[in-house]
Image: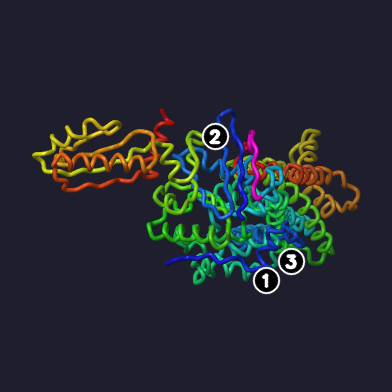
């Protein structure tokens, strides 16, 4: 049975009268990967700092692994954190670094040695454990940071921009790690990132923040639905029949028809009205049926699924206006 | 390459979550801070510079002594005072980097999200800074030994230097950490600390021939460095008894108690991500 590991209710943080986070409510369960999204300055890092007790909220309540916000030591004992732009002591080796953090959690010297070796292997740094951190690439440092965040076998892992500045291969490695943390250790992962396609791929839940407020939260599908993202399609017909096709489709409610100068034989169709995915698909089926019934040969018909990035852009732009 | 995090081994990490106790986090932090100070080369560079300066001062002092410009007791006193003052300066510089430096390097947040009490973090940093004072004192022992041969004050000089220096180093090390906690920039913190030490050190360097009225006396007694050095001087040069000028140690003692106490009491509020942010 999965249990709720992160529960925040109306969390608010003000700095000198300026609001950084306002009424943020978030919840997450064991084994879940929650994507915390938002433009720069949306309040993602502040939210993570509040939930990890680095900052104290101005108002609101939260609990981590059942511990209330007032039990900061207990919360710190059961969370793992990779802060944004985390620094590393360049003169230490990766193994020394992990051993030190293990000992901060009360692990004996010998246990810290085996634990650091185990985690270095887990993040693919077993061959570089005795090298100085100054010789590590950015991707290696991020993986070392994730290993450090796992040192106490946390119930909840907070990763603030773990893929920032990494090449695609490095990003893929970090995302692999995140998946396996949630799966093998049954930990909740709260992931703050700008990589929307990856969030779509790994996150079971998404929270979009803007100007310190939660705009929307839920599964990726729910977020897209809430954003009422248009389901679009491309219809290619012979150029001499394009006007006839336009006339046939002109009567469809909620259907927008566009054309580009580059591809005059292609109609770009968009459905912009409330409804489920299946409603949108039905409309497109009717469109296709109407065109073929009118005797217009269909050269190409492509449905384009709505993406989280579209929802993100639409919602954050709406938030701005 | 696909990376996989295995489930935790039973009996190792699970104990961590339960908060296995029995080891002092203060000592763990202190050990790491000392290792950082000495293996990063910072401590060794400061110690090397200290040794070079002390060699120069000792050479000049012994030359003056050979030319009968200085008595042997005076030359021991001069070198010991220099060792204490510069050793304390090094301690202050290291402690001034303690919190603001970690902020700048981005390593403080990872420390703050561990269950280590803030007081242990700050205490560990103070111990590491004091390790530099102890190292400078060890380096100065042979110099004092060379100068003090034959007058029977070696033991007294070393004991005095160690006690007074440690007292002043605790006080100024604590002040350095307080300044560091109050500054967001490491440069500001170190500059403010050095400026403070110069203010404290300058009165001790006034030529003894100058008229020294009640104002100088107040300045001397209110200054932990100057009054500590004056106590050393009163015993080594003037031959006073240990207890005769104990009042001179009131300021160094009060500085150590007040600054150290402030550090312990306000530690949880001081060790935070940025200055002025209400951290937990």
Q: Is residue B189 visible?
A: no
Q: Chain of mark 1?
A: A
Extreme-left residue of the structure: A240
Quarter of the image with the N terminus of chain B in it: bottom left
Q: Of residues A271 and A70, which is closer to you in this image?
A: A271
Q: Which residue is mark 1?
A: A110
> What residue lies at 58% left-to-right and 59% top-to-bottom?
A186
From the top left corner, tell me how far across and down residue B256 is, in percent. Answer: 78, 46
The magenta-colored residue range is: A57-65
Give the quadrant of residue A261. top left
Q: Which residue is mark 2?
A: A20
Q: Of residues A241 and B30, which is closer to you in this image?
A: A241
Extreme-front residue of the structure: A293
Neighbor class of circle 2 (other Cα within 10 Å; few <14, some 14-19, many 20+) is some
- Residue B68 is covered by the magenta coloring: no
- Residue A60 is covered by the magenta coloring: yes
Q: Is residue B121 visible?
A: yes
Q: Earlier in the sequence, mark 1 or mark 2?
A: 2
Q: Of residues A39 and A281, which is closer to you in this image?
A: A281
Q: CA distance from mark 1 to mark 2?
A: 43 Å
Comparing labels 1 and 3, the label whose residue is closer to the camera: 1
* Labels 2 and 3 positioned on one and the same chain: no
From the top left corner, tell me how far across and down residue A320 is, in percent. Answer: 42, 30
Quarter of the image with the C terminus of chain B in it: top right
Main secondary structure of the magenta stretch: strand
Neighbor class of circle 3 (other Cα within 10 Å; few <14, some 14-19, many 20+) is few
Comparing labels 1 and 2, the label whose residue is closer to the camera: 2
SS class of the residue under badge 3? Answer: helix
* Labels 1 and 3 positioned on one and the same chain: no
Q: CA distance from mark 1 to mark 3?
A: 45 Å
Label at residue B146 = 3
Q: Chain of mark 2?
A: A
């Amino acid at each position: 049975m999965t249990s709720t590991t992160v529960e925040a209710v109306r969390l608010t943080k003000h700095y000198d009268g300026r609001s950084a986070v306002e009424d943020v409510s978030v919840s997450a369960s064991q084994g879940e990967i929650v994507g915390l999204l938002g433009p720069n300055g949306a309040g993602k890092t502040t939210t993570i700092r509040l939930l990890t007790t680095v900052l104290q909220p101005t108002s609101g309540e939260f609990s981590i692994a059942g511990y209330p916000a007032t039990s900061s030591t207990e919360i710190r004992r059961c969370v793992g954190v990779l802060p944004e732009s985390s620094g590393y002591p360049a003169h230490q080796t990766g193994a020394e670094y992990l051993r030190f953090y293990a000992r901060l959690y009360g692990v004996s010297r010998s246990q810290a040695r085996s634990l650091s070796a185990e985690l270095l292997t887990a993040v693919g740094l077993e061959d570089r454990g005795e090298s100085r951190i100054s010789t590590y690439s950015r991707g290696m440092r991020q993986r070392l940071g994730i290993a450090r965040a796992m040192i106490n076998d946390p119930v909840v892992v907070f990763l603030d921009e773990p893929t920032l500045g990494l090449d695609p291969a490095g990003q893929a490695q970090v995302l692999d790690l995140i998946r396996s943390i949630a799966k093998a250790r049954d930990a909740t992962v709260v992931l703050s990132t700008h990589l929307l396609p990856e969030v779509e791929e790994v996150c079971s839940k998404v929270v979009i923040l803007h100007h310190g407020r939660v705009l929307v939260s839920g599964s990726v599908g729910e977020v897209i639905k809430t954003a009422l993202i248009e389901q679009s399609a491309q219809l290619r017909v012979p150029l001499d029949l394009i006007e006839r096709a336009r006339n046939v489709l002109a009567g469809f409610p909620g259907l927008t028809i566009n054309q580009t100068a580059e591809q005059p034989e292609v109609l770009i169709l968009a459905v912009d009205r409330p409804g489920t995915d299946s409603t949108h698909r039905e409309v497109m089926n009717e469109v296709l049926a109407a065109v073929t019934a009118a005797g217009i040969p269909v050269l190409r018909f492509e449905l384009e699924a709505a993406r989280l990035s579209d929802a993100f852009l639409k919602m954050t732009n709406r938030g701005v206006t | 390459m696909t990376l996989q995090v295995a489930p935790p081994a039973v009996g190792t990490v699970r104990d961590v979550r339960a908060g296995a106790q029995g080891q002092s986090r203060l000592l763990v932090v202190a050990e790491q801070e000392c290792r950082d100070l000495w293996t990063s080369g910072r401590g060794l560079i400061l110690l090397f510079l200290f040794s070079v300066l002390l060699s120069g001062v000792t050479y000049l002092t012994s030359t003056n002594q050979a030319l009968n410009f200085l008595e042997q007791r005076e030359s021991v006193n001069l070198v010991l005072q220099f060792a204490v003052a510069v050793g304390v300066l090094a301690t202050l510089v290291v402690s001034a980097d303690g919190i603001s430096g970690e902020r700048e390097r981005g390593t403080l947040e990872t420390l703050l999200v561990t269950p280590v009490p803030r007081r242990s973090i700050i205490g560990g940093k103070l111990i590491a800074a004091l390790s530099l004072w102890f190292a400078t004192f060890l380096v100065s022992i042979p110099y004092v030994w060379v100068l003090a041969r034959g007058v029977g004050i070696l033991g007294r000089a070393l004991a005095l230097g160690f006690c007074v220096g440690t007292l002043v180093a605790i006080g100024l090390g604590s002040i350095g950490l307080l300044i560091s906690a109050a500054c967001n920039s490491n440069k500001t913190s170190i500059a403010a600390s050095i400026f403070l030490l110069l203010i404290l050190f300058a009165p001790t360097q006034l030529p003894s021939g100058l008229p020294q009225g009640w104002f100088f006396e107040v300045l001397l007694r209110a200054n932990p460095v100057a009054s500590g050095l004056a106590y050393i001087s009163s015993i080594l040069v003037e031959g006073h008894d240990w207890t005769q000028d104990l009042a001179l140690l009131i300021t160094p003692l009060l500085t150590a108690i007040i600054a150290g106490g402030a550090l312990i009491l306000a530690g949880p509020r001081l060790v935070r991500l940025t200055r002025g942010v209400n951290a937990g």
